[in-house]
Image (cartoon, grey):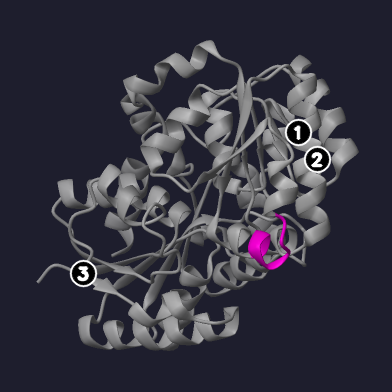
Amino acid sequence: MKKKIAVITGTRPGLIMMYSLYHELKKNNFNFFVIHTNQHFSKNMDFDIMEDLNFKDIKYRISNSKISKSSITQLSDQIKGIENVFLKEKPNLVVVFGDTNSNLSAALVARKLDMKLMHIEAGERSKNWQQPEEHNRKIIDIISDYLIVTNEDSKKTLINEGVNKKKIFICGNPIVDATVINSKKIYKKQNNRKNNKYGVLTFHRQEIADSKTFIKEIIEGVSQASLKLKLAQTYFFIHPRTLKNIKKFKLKDFINKFEIIKPMSSIGYINFLTYLKNSSIVFTDSGGVQQEAVILNIPTIILREKTEWKSATIYSRQLISGPNKEKIIEQSSLIQKKKLINKWIFGKPGVSKRIIKIINTVI
């Protein structure tokens, strides 16, 4: 009987990172199944992305995860649901991507049930302990059997933290494959946007989106930076968490005062990639969008104080502003002079093929 693999997803970045490995596993006839935790549950952040990326057979969904009231409740619901599936399926290898609660839940269950665990995107550190994702990624790395890292820097981080180097494999990041393959599918109906200079804005992280002050600072800073750069518009793609807080803080009228900022609902993956590829500048706190922007060579202002992708600020057209109005305006001007040195800092295409080779040696 073929060894069985469990693959865990549940968020927009998780689905995107899973894309190329999922199709490589299918292509190579692996015995695997997917658990979707429903951590992101809006239509545009889930079903539209799954359709874009041709995911047809998600075997399990953790239904109660999407209605969890808090991070702790969400973890608890995910752990219970994942445990039930693992006890039934008895996978020989559990694969998790990145640093979300979905991955932490699956990693903890795998460890407690003595199942082999592989962490893809291991060894990344923002060194910001206020960031929940930083807790998750460190815990997952500590309890994993196999750590798939993006580059030598990630490997060194793990070794410095005491991880046995024999458990570490440099393969690159699967988001490279997803971005390269899917950027060729951008919607032709939107190609006319490249004739108009515009920006893209998105933020969702707890430490930023949960702050009324930071939301206002970002909107004001991005508006003024957009005007200074003579953009026709900056499209503000509003994450469900951010939307909830805009309503909570009664900021809708405040945002609508800035005519250059155009609020948009969350959209599907290919549609968003189209906006991104044809944009003049990106303002984001998203690690995934930050990576996509490097590969597409789009100037990017990082709306948080620290990032796990520090190499992007060295080798690509990215600068850190934090959620600070004046800094956003200043860095938006400076970024125009910054040159791309290396767009393959997250690995060259073929990442999932390299991961498949590792899986074949460990399973």
User: Foreground: 136 or 112?
Assistant: 136
Give the answer, above or below, for where 9 lies relative to 110.
Answer: above
Q: Which residue is mark 2?
A: 220
Residue 207 makes an appearance in the image:
yes
Q: Which residue is mark 3?
A: 59
Q: Residue at x 32, y 49 (%)?
A: 48
Name the N-terminal-most of marks 3 and 1: 3
Q: Residue at x 64, y 67 (%)?
A: 138
Q: Quadrant of the N terminus?
A: bottom left
* Three-letter amino acid code of the residue under disc 1: Ser
Tags 3 and 1 touching, CB below 8 Å: no
Residue 357 makes an appearance in the image:
no
Give the answer, above or below, for where 290 lies relative to 43.
Answer: above
Is residue 247 within the magenta segment?
Answer: yes
Find the magenta span and give its range: 245-251
Q: CA distance from mark 3 to mark 1?
A: 44 Å
The secondary element bearing badge 2 is classed as helix
The secondary element bearing badge 1 is classed as helix
* Three-letter amino acid code of the residue under disc 3: Lys
Q: Which residue is mark 1?
A: 223
Is residue 357 within the magenta segment?
Answer: no
Q: CA distance from mark 2 to mark 1?
A: 5 Å
The secondary element bearing badge 3 is classed as loop
Q: In the image, residue 207 lies at what x, y percent? A: 74, 62
